[in-house]
Amino acid sequence: MRFADFSLAALSAALDAQRRERGLSWAQVTREISRQPPRSRGTGMAVSTIEHIGTKRAAEGDGVLQMLLWLNRSPESFVPGHEDDGRASAPLPNMRANQMLRFDTKKLYAALDARRAELGLSWALVAKEIGLSAASLTYLAKGTRTSFPQVMRITAWLGRPAAEFTRVCNR
């Protein structure tokens, strides 16, 4: 089974449309997405990361989550052909200014492993169905970071919303 990939190009277009609508520069957008005060010298995302996200094949998952929060959109809303059936899409959680949203890859791995065992499949077969390597799936158990569009292939295979696999962290 092949799943439609999360569209980084569509994310880029939505970011640019919101930027233009609000009359912001890319630097201002980056500060807002990174949740930085105007004169802060903190380390957030690079302007070029956000400005050129649509030209990439993959993007770091936690950064994309911040962009989605800024747009007030679900990850599923950028998957071509996705129809919100109320089951496979959910809004991302609200957070305070001193918090950040991250993927909980250990939880994602546990859900994958449970579903794999329930279906009696090997990691190689699960990986083939999702369109990723078995190593990239089992590596999630270490709590490592993930990326888009890969994480959306995984959540689509599970039939669960990506928001279910996020956690709110204090900065």
Image (cartoon, rainbow, N blue to C red):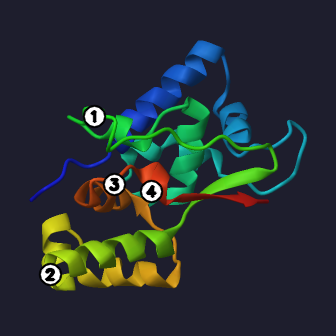
In this image, 26 relative to 36: left or right?
left
Residue 133 in view here: no
Residue 81, placed above or below residue 105: above
Task: Indicate which label's residue lies in the foreground, 3 or 1.
Answer: 1
Residue 65, placed above or below residue 51: below
Task: Indicate which label's residue lies in the foreground, 2 or 4.
Answer: 2
Q: Earlier in the sequence, mark 2 or mark 1?
A: 1
Instruction: Tell me how far mark 2 sits from mark 1, CA to CA.
Output: 27 Å
In this image, 108 relative to 5: left or right?
right
Q: Position of residue 141 (x, y in %)?
A: 45, 82
- Identify residue for label 1: 85
- Identify residue for label 2: 121
| Numbered circle sitting on residue 59 | 4
Q: Amino acid at mark 3?
A: Met
Dot 1, crowdedness within 10 Å: few (<14), some or many (≥20)? few
Instruction: Tell me how far mark 2 sits from mark 4, CA to CA.
Output: 29 Å
Q: Amino acid at mark 1?
A: Asp
Callout 3–callout 1 Cβ contact below 8 Å: no
Residue 143 in view here: yes
- Identify residue for label 3: 152
Mark 2: secondary structure: loop
Instruction: Tell me how far mark 3 sits from mark 2, CA to CA.
Output: 20 Å
Residue at image point 66% right, 40% down: 94
Dot 3, crowdedness within 10 Å: few (<14), some or many (≥20)? many
Mark 3: secondary structure: helix
Q: Position of residue 84 (x, y in %)?
A: 30, 33
Q: Earlier in the sequence, mark 3 or mark 1?
A: 1
Instruction: Tell me how far mark 3 sits from mark 4, CA to CA.
Output: 12 Å
Q: Earlier in the sequence, mark 3 or mark 4?
A: 4
Q: Earlier in the sequence, mark 2 or mark 4?
A: 4
Q: Position of residue 135 (x, y in %)?
A: 30, 85
